[in-house]
Amino acid sequence: QLPAAVTIWEVGPRDGLQNEQEIVPLDVKLEFLHRLADAGLAVVETTSFVRPEWVPQLADAAELLDGLQRTPGVRYPVLVPNSRGLDRALQAGVSDVAIFASATETFTRRNLNRGLDEQFVMFDPVVRRAVAEGLRVRGYVSMCFGDPWEGPVAVDQVVSVGRRLLEMGCEQLSLGDTIGVATPGHVEALLRAFATSGIGVDRLAVHFHDTYGQALANTHAALRAGVSTVDSSAGGLGGCPYAKSATGNLATEDLVWMLDGLGIEHGVDLGALVETSRWMAERLGRPSPSRVVRALAAS
Ligand code: HMG
Ligand code: MG
């Protein structure tokens, strides 16, 4: 049973731009954000309030939010890893935050400089204070399907990390295939494990990277299991600077093309989005990896 409508959680400005070799100028980031909202995206993940030494690409988070002209009705979530990040995000007037946990020990250390259990100690006060301040809080779980250092990841381990984030007060989990190794059967198995443990599909989103070309097939499997929030990035930008072999996210255009074919509502103007990704590709000096962007830009 496919959902009638899907919320596209656009992560290009955050997951996409965090991974660029050259730091993208502030005015280009702002225009990107404005164009994405104009194209009809209702959730545009904007930036991260992480330690600037760790992700210099997003060190301008405060200036970015200061210059952002918010479209009414559009959500602009930001990533926060710790209390310092939440302080900065609150100062910038955000109303939507996301913490980002990992299902594996190695990636928690590499991405957060903490152990697997220590990450919860870091997140707990953040989530509680954010909820008390009336913010919406999402919890990412990275390395849900495989980890470049540890190999395959057990579904029970992912469910256990996800459950702890929900118990803290996260309203939604985003299940990340950080390095793009998932296949549809594995997606079904993980979603079944969540269902079996009593965590409803309405609390789950999926976040696929397209390293092995499986992102769209995986998304279809998730839709069939009832997931109705899907993360993607305009033009297929993305990756994670702390996970070797992570490439771009599922491209939003590829997702929209499939949703159109399935008759699932999404609210996005595909033409405006392709135009935005073409414009961004020029700014970045390389073509978009999205097949749909390439096909439509050539036609
Ligand atoms: P740390 O080095 O352990 O920091 O980093 P610390 O807690 O020891 O603090 C050291 C200093 O940093 C202190 O300053 C803090 O104030 C400062 P001092 O007292 O020495 O002057 N500091 C900060 N400054 C500004 N903003 C902050 C902040 N925090 C501390 N928020 C930390 C620990 C978690 C901060 C670091 O590891 C970090 O920033 N990591 C972020 C890595 C990241 O952004 N990765 C990419 C996002 S995850 C992803 O892409 C996956 C995802 O897409 C899903 C998927 O694909 O699976 C979400
Ligand atoms: Mg990601």
Image (cartoon, rainbow, N blue to C red):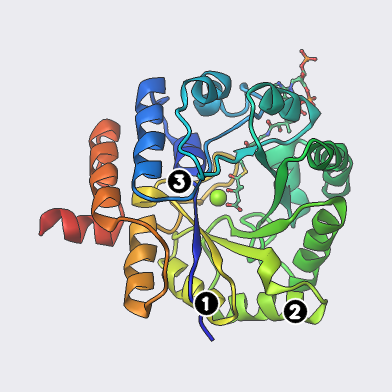
The residue lying toward the viewer, choosing from 203 and 75, is 75
Q: Amino acid at mark 2?
A: Ala
Label drawn at residue 195? 2
Q: Note whether residue 135 is visible.
A: yes
Q: Amino acid at mark 1?
A: Pro
Within 10 Å of the Cα at label 3, are there few (<14), some (14-19), or many (20+) other Cα atoms? many
Label drawn at residue 166? none
Q: Amino acid at mark 3?
A: Gly
Left/right placement of residue 132 relative to residue 93 reads right
Left/right placement of residue 291 relative to residue 191 reads left
Q: Single out the residue that lies furthest toward the left.
A: 299
Cβ of mark 2 under 8 A from ligand 1: no
Within 10 Å of the Cα at label 1, are there few (<14), some (14-19), or many (20+) other Cα atoms? some
Q: Note whether residue 100 is visible.
A: no
Q: Establish if 67 lies above or below 254.
A: above
Residue appearing at x 70%, y 27% in the figure: 90
Quadrant containing ligand 1: top right
Q: Quadrant of the C terminus?
A: bottom left
Q: Nearer the viewer, mark 1 or mark 2?
A: 1
Q: x, y percentage for residue 46?
A: 52, 37
Q: Quadrant of residue 52?
A: top right
Q: Establish if 38 lies above or below 177.
A: above
Label drawn at residue 238? 3
> Residue beneath label 1, please?
3
What's the distance in space between the residues labelled 2 and 3, CA to CA?
A: 29 Å
Left/right placement of residue 128 relative to residue 65 reads right
Left/right placement of residue 265 relative to residue 257 reads right
Q: x, y percentage for residue 275?
A: 23, 46
Residue appearing at x 40%, y 46% in the figure: 237
Cβ of mark 3 under 8 A from ligand 2: yes
Q: x, y percentage for residue 166?
A: 81, 58
